[in-house]
Image (tube, rainbow, N blue to C red):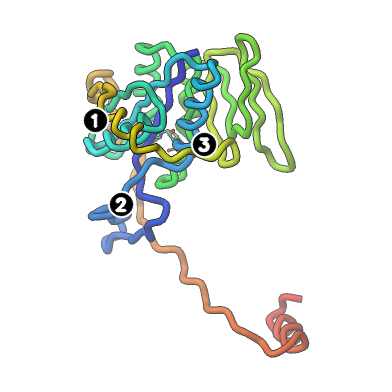
């Protein structure tokens, strides 16, 4: 089974984001960038499939600036086989990402595409679903467990109130949730080996996809500042404060 894993370069999840003074977006100047955490989980899953003998090849693809090469290298150091960078400095919305991925898929013919359930920068949670619709492929979203079942895949999904198990014919799209696995850290020897793995470079234009935005961002603002808490002497004071605040 050939597995394609799209990975996005995003602002590192440990960074406290700062909104630009003109409220047009988030300040990315001199900010640490990393692989989208959900994509680390999908890379890990693909690599585990390879180690278990269910996956034959793991291809990593990223759409983004030149530096997204580093993100691809990280995935290659975790165990991916080769990479494809679709180089652009523009912001690419989920629909355009899905359209480009559909073209990559036409070239690569993977049996499984493993995406993150969402990118932590735009929180769209759209790309996998749009890709499944564009290709008319079955999809299993929010995967908690993925098992190969003959030519099909059994995907256990995290849903409200429990777990739902679905069976998908391949080729299929699966988006991964947080509890699927714990991604590994790449070892130094594997980081060195990854430097020699091939990364093809393309541009959105090579696939004939128009990436011009369809949405306009009205404004980006900081979340409201949380009010400071207060320590009380005893339970009686707590209860009376809660009562006077109308909380109980
Ligand atoms: P989103 O729909 O933006 O929340 O992203 C969901 C998933 O789509 C991510 O976890 C990635 O697997 C994939 N994805 C989104 N944007 C990109 C990108 N620019 N390059 C590669 N994969 C992407």
Q: Nearer the viewer, mark 2 or mark 3?
A: 2
Residue, x 34% and y 38% (percent of image)? 188
Disc 2: which residue = 32
Residue, x 35% and y 52% (percent of image)? 218
Q: Is mark 3 within 8 Å of ligand 1?
A: yes
User: Which quadrant does the C terminus fall into?
Assistant: bottom right
Image x and y of residue 240, in percent = 75, 87
Q: Can residue 125 be seen? A: no
Give me the C-alpha separation between circle 2 and circle 1. 19 Å
Question: Toward the viewer: 218 or 176?
Answer: 176
**Mark 2 Cα shell of 10 Å, populated few (<14), some (14-19), many (≥20):** few
Question: Residue 19's mark?
Answer: none
Q: Is mark 1 within 8 Å of ligand 1?
A: no
Give the quadrant of residue 220.
Answer: bottom left
Question: Residue 87's mark?
Answer: 1
231 shown above or below 75: below
Image x and y of residue 73, in percent = 31, 33
**Mark 1 Cα shell of 10 Å, populated few (<14), some (14-19), many (≥20):** some
Disc 3: which residue = 117
Give me the C-alpha separation between circle 3 and circle 1. 22 Å
Mark 2 or mark 3: whose residue is earlier in sequence: 2
Tell whether label 1 touches label 2 (CB within 8 Å): no
């Amino acid at each position: 089974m050939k597995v394609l894993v799209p990975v996005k370069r995003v602002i590192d999840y440990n960074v406290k984001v700062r909104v630009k003074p003109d409220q047009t977006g988030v300040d990315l100047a001199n900010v640490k960038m990393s692989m989208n955490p959900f994509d680390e989980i999908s890379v890990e899953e693909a690599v585990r499939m390879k180690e278990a003998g269910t996956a034959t090849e793991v291809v990593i693809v990223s759409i983004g600036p030149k530096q997204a090469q580093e993100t691809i290298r990280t995935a290659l150091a975790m165990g991916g086989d080769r990479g494809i960078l679709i180089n652009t400095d523009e912001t690419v919305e989920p629909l355009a990402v899905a359209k480009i991925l559909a073209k990559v898929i036409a070239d690569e013919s993977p049996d499984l595409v493993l995406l993150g359930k969402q990118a932590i920068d735009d929180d769209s949670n759209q790309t996998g679903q749009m890709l499944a619709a564009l290709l008319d492929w079955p999809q299993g979203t929010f995967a908690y467990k993925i098992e190969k079942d003959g030519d099909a895949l059994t995907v256990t999904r995290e849903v409200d109130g429990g777990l739902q198990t679905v069976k998908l014919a391949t080729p299929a799209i699966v988006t991964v949730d947080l509890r699927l696995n714990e991604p590994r850290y790449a070892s130094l020897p594997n980081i060195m080996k990854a430097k020699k793995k091939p990364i093809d470079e393309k541009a959105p234009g090579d696939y004939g996809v128009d990436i011009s935005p369809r949405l306009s961002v009205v404004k980006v603002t900081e979340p409201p500042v949380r009010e400071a808490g207060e320590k009380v002497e005893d339970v009686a004071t707590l209860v009376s404060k809660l009562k006077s605040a109308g909380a109980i």
